[in-house]
Amino acid sequence: MLIPNDLDAKLLADFIKEDRTEIRLIKNRIYTYIQVLIGASFTFTAFFIGKSMDKGVVNLTPNVKEIIVFTNIAFLVISWIIFYFQNKDLQFVRRCLTDREKKLEAMGVNYFENCDDKLPNWCKKFLKKFWPTEFINDSLLFIPMCLLTLIYAGVIVTVCFYF
């Protein structure tokens, strides 16, 4: 059974909307994981440092230092593993989005005319010409991950050399 061209174009446009929603959800998930793991690391470290306090002075035994350092290293490795898989999902969804937009364009349908947003026509033409979807990358997601790595490194260095 053949699907009429209008219905096929509408389905592709709906899939594009779903892909964009999925991209937003994956990015939100990455930021949430970063926040949770940083909070868990600080909570874990503060718990062990608080248990080691004696009259306002922190006396960490070597075993407690090792536990704190290895746990923070484990948090760091877990966060990079989670980020790797979430980033792969994000790249896959981006690829699907690009392919669907190309199929829709090959059908002769201008997707920017069917958008729900209220962009002026000159803006839609500008976006289509100078900012195609295949050039959108998510390299900015590496900035929070690098900051996360620096925070973990700071915690590890502080525990090893300050206490």
Image (cartoon, helix red, strand yellow):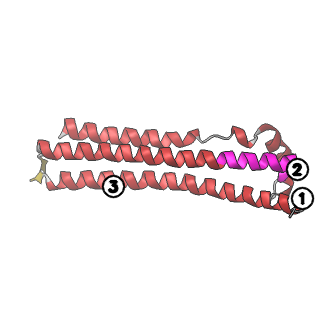
The residue positioned 81% from the left and 43% from the top of the image is: 128
Q: Nearer the viewer, mark 3 or mark 1?
A: 1
Amino acid tagged 1: Asn
The residue positioned 39% from the left and 40% from the top of the image is: 149
Q: Is residue 117 visible?
A: no
Q: Secondary structure at mark 2?
A: loop
**83 w.r.t. 29: above or below:** above
| The image quarter in which residue 66 lies | top left
> Which class describes the residues within 10 Å of circle 2: few (<14), some (14-19), or many (20+)?
few
- Could you say which disc has been placed on residue 82 in the image? none
**According to the image, label 2 marks what residue?**
107
**According to the image, label 3 marks what residue?**
40
**Most distant residue in the left direction:** 55
Amino acid tagged 2: Met
- Do the residues under discs 3 and 2 have CB atoms within 8 angstroms? no
Q: Earlier in the sequence, mark 2 or mark 1?
A: 1
The span shown in magenta is 94-112
**According to the image, label 1 marks what residue?**
5
Q: Where is the C terminus found, in terms of image quarters?
A: top left
- Do the residues under discs 2 and 1 have CB atoms within 8 angstroms? yes
Q: Where is the N terminus found, in terms of image quarters?
A: bottom right
